[in-house]
Amino acid sequence: MPLRSSSNGPASGVEAATPAGAGRRHDLDALRGFAMLLGIGLHASLAFFPTWWPVEDAKADVHGPYDEFFHAVHGFRMPVFFLLSGFFTAMLWRRRGLGSLLRQRVTRVLIPLAIGAATIVPLMDWVVDESYSSPDIVTAVIIGDPEGVQRFIDGGYELEAQGEDGGTILHLAAVLATAEVTEVLLEAGADPDARNFSGDTPLTAAFAFGNEAAADLLVAYGAPDKRPAGMAWRDIDGWGFLAETLEAPADEQAGSESWVTSLHHLWFLWFLCLLVAGFVAAVGLSKCVAAIRPGEPRPGITRQATLVTLVVATWPGQYLMGEQGAFRVFGPDTSTGLVPEPHVLGYYALFFAFGVVAFDTRGRGGGELADTLGRHWRITLPATLVIVFPLSLYATFGSDSGGQWAWWVASLLQAAFTWAMILALIGLFRAVLSVERRGVRYLSDSAYWLYLIHLPLVIAGQAWIRDWGVPASVKFVGLCAVTTLILLASYQVFVRYTPIGVLLNGRRTRDRSQVSAT
């Protein structure tokens, strides 16, 4: 059933709508959609190598390709998105004016963010809480995760293994864990009378830290009960004398609780709102300056110099990531709170500003700069992936020598990788997708919805297949494919021709004449 849009221009909330007849940048629109759809694969990959992600697959392995895939995508995906957002923001401003720009961004970005904060964010909190898998049995005990503890026991964890002080995992549970976790350990055969190097038993630890539920369970499973007849634990002198030394309740030390105040993956909408607000302020300021000091505009070479300056500035911007290299990271940090990290917002502002300036900049022969960027992509794209990316990874993670100078080098290579990928992809998409293709157009239109709603489904899927005994590659590809198909179906049924679709992408109508013919 052929379908058509009621608009000739880009319509999603993360790009500009152009008036009928003005033409649509099919190549850049497709690249914007590609960057958003890559987010599904990027987030799906996080379960397949050890990291901070709430779900760790049973087949997770640091030697697999998934961490490299994550770093490669993370290194350029959001920078290219914000660059294109700046480009389309300038396009809408030039073609429709500042008022239309503000109305469109409020409708397509700010309102979806507000709705998402009230719906998608709580859903994410619930899914993460239900799906969280502890990376080790110690974390599982600390956060009170009985299913996680049982998973490590089933995997062969030695219950009588001793830590640095000679204590067992049951000693830790007696201090911090819930009754459910303590019972899982005892039911599995943990020795209730095990002793650390100081001669203390789990019951001694439970007594010192005032864990009454653990003390009762330990006695029930064979620990000697030395209480006077009829006396409660808390009535014994010294009960819980170390309780105040605990830094925080167990559920605040690790696990899903750290996610609750986060915008999760919707942070990019908040950043876009802030950057558009900055753009509007800059336009207003420039008009005030022009009114005070009228004159001829600066020559075009100034714009090109500005673009070069913005590119160079991303090097020190990358240097600030990971607390200036104290924690080695590849690509930008993530800031998901309402108060953004200044260095992260500033970093993305550089790409946004590049897109804004690039829209009005002429390239070779007087044509649009966007039509000449990345023209050597056939050379730069493979060279970037085969040479620059591996060098960047090695400089970032391969050596600890060199101190801050080494981090400067790693930051330079990462910035080079980011820009090389952005320019090469712009050239590639210009070469192959400069004219409308119905399927690509459909995916581009759907990408906004797919990215907004994908993460709860991805995490739930990761948790569901976590313990399947099939290769990680099968899980990863299957998770990406099934998730995308489900999301596309939801877009077609619940979004494309509904008020949700109008809010996100503008109104779309079916081609009645072609529908009748079919």
Image (cartoon, rainbow, N blue to C red):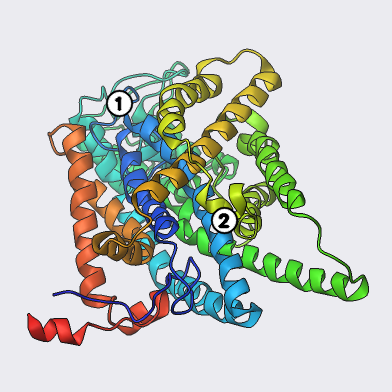
Q: Quadrant of the C terminus?
A: bottom left
Which is nearer the eye, 510 or 12? 510
Q: Is residue 174 visible?
A: no
**Residue 481 at what x, y percent from top left?**
20, 50
Side of 335 relative to 214 (left or right)? right
Side of 241 relative to 495 (left or right)? right
User: Under tag 2, what secondary structure?
Assistant: loop
Badge 1 density bin: few <14, some 14–19, many ≥20, Cα 10 Å: some
Q: Outermost residue toward the top?
A: 401
Q: Quadrant of residue 500?
A: bottom left
Q: CA distance from mark 1 to mark 2?
A: 42 Å
**Residue 2 at what x, y percent from top left?**
17, 74
- Tally of numbered tags: 2
Label 1–label 2 contact, CB within 8 A: no
Q: Quadrant of the N terminus?
A: bottom left
Looking at marks 1 and 2 on the same chain, the residue that comes earlier in the sequence is marked by: 1
Badge 2 density bin: few <14, some 14–19, many ≥20, Cα 10 Å: some
Residue type (three-letter) at the residue carrying disc 1 = Gly
Side of 503 relative to 515 (left or right)? right
Q: Is residue 234 visible?
A: yes
What residue is shown with label 2? 368
Q: Quadrant of residue 161?
A: top left
Q: Residue at x 53, y 46 (%)?
A: 372
Query: Vertical placement of 276 versus 514: above or below?
Result: above
User: Under tag 1, what secondary structure?
Assistant: loop
Which is nearer the eye, 484 or 377? 377
What residue is shown with label 1? 64
